Image (tube, rainbow, N blue to C red):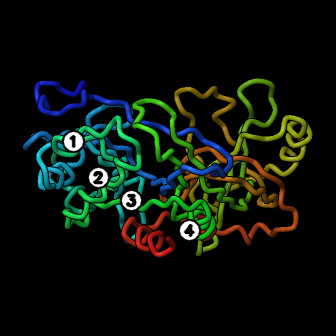
Amino acid sequence: MEIPLTRFDRLGIDRPLPPMEAKLVESLPTDEGWQFEPKWDGFRCLVYRDGDAVELQSKAERPLTRYFPEIEAAVRQLPGDRLVLDGELVIPIDGILSFDALQLRLHPAESRIRKLAAASPAQIILFDALQIGDEILIGSPLESRRAALAQFHEQVAREDVRLSPCTTDRAIAEDWLASTGGALDGVVAKRRDAAYEPGERAMLKVKQRRTADCVVGGFRYAAKGGGIGSLLLGLYDESGKLNHVGFTSAIPAEEKSSLTARLEAIVEPPGFTGRAPGGPSRWSTERSAEWQPLRPELVVEVRYDHITGDRFRHGTKFLRWRPDKAPRQCRMDQLQPEAGPGELIQSLEGAR
């Protein structure tokens, strides 16, 4: 579905517009001239407004408007009748950002979307401005765009339209990474003298280095070769049940042969006593889809990026074995959910 181009003809920016992106790096830049911002864990969203016409566009240049009617209404009530803004859609539930709630919005039934919007309304966190009123900002340096966005947001008295914090002090950005735990997805660095570059990886991002110690509750064989393909990870909940929370397949190649024999020696059901791994997917072979349960004896430390609900959203990075840690010490409370935007924005602004 393409965004219709019959509206928004008073805007000075063509749509759909690919948003500027970031390149993943290991550390924040140390030279001068950078602005640092929190990296939010939500849906990237470009906002277009021309009078009463409002469109929300995803990172993939697809329309999001019908899925977030409350944000469409909020944008329509903002000052100024011509806007092109860049930001992130988030949904806080019980003070924590919920990526699951965002995904649930992508539903074909309008009645379902309206019900979800009323029960758990979304917010948009703004961090860039490409046009405000008659002023076309896309070619202006970030310093000018940010100043215009901050001045614009001073006129906005809404909890559902927020301004993302920023700083030019690298030490403060490092403190954000060190002190916010799982509440922050990472930090983005942008050149203050640079124009907005649609579709280009013109920014840098450093992600949180979150780790967890997990029980190896099972494994899957590789689709080819017969060795270990992935380790299935578990954490104990408050009731003492071992729940499947994700996997890691980044096992050092030199370990795979000996590890296969080691794991096959401790195969024993049930493996997971709480939530168990899912069944095969349409891409799996019969052998690779089957998982083997293990006695809960081995503990592994992994690095992860996002939490969705109470499990890892993506595969994790294998770091090391933890023979010094008892499996029962590997509990769900290690997983750090992301705090809601209001609480986090206040804490970040307080650190500036």
> Is there any visible trace of residue 296 in the rendered image?
yes
Residue 177 in picture, x, y percent from top left: 60, 62
Q: Amino acid at mark 4?
A: Thr
At horizontal 37% and vertical 30% (from top left) the residue drawn is 18
Which quadrant of the view contains residue 159?
A: bottom left
Image position, residue 135 (x, y; %): 21, 41
Q: Earlier in the sequence, mark 4 or mark 2?
A: 2
Instruction: Select label 3 or label 4 by which is in front.
Output: 3
Name the mark nearer the viewer: 1 or 3.
1
The CA distance from mark 4 to mark 1 is: 36 Å
The span from disc 3 to disc 2 (Cα, nearest Å) is 14 Å
Question: Is the Cβ of the residue at disc 1 closer than 8 Å to that at disc 2?
Answer: yes
Q: Quadrant of the N terminus?
A: top left
In this orientation, does residue 87 appear? no
Res 148 label: 2
The disc labelled 2 sits on which kind of residue? Ala
- Name the kind of residue labelled 1 in the image: Glu
Q: Secondary structure at mark 2?
A: helix
Earlier in the chain: of badge 3 and badge 4, it is 3
Q: Which residue is mark 3?
A: 164
Residue pointed to by mark 1? 135
Determine the CA span between mark 1 and mark 2: 9 Å
Q: Earlier in the sequence, mark 3 or mark 2?
A: 2
Q: Amino acid at mark 3?
A: Ser
Asked if the residue at tag 2 contacts the one at tag 3, i.e. Cβ–Cβ closer than 8 Å, the answer is no
Q: Residue at x 24, y 64 (%)?
A: 154
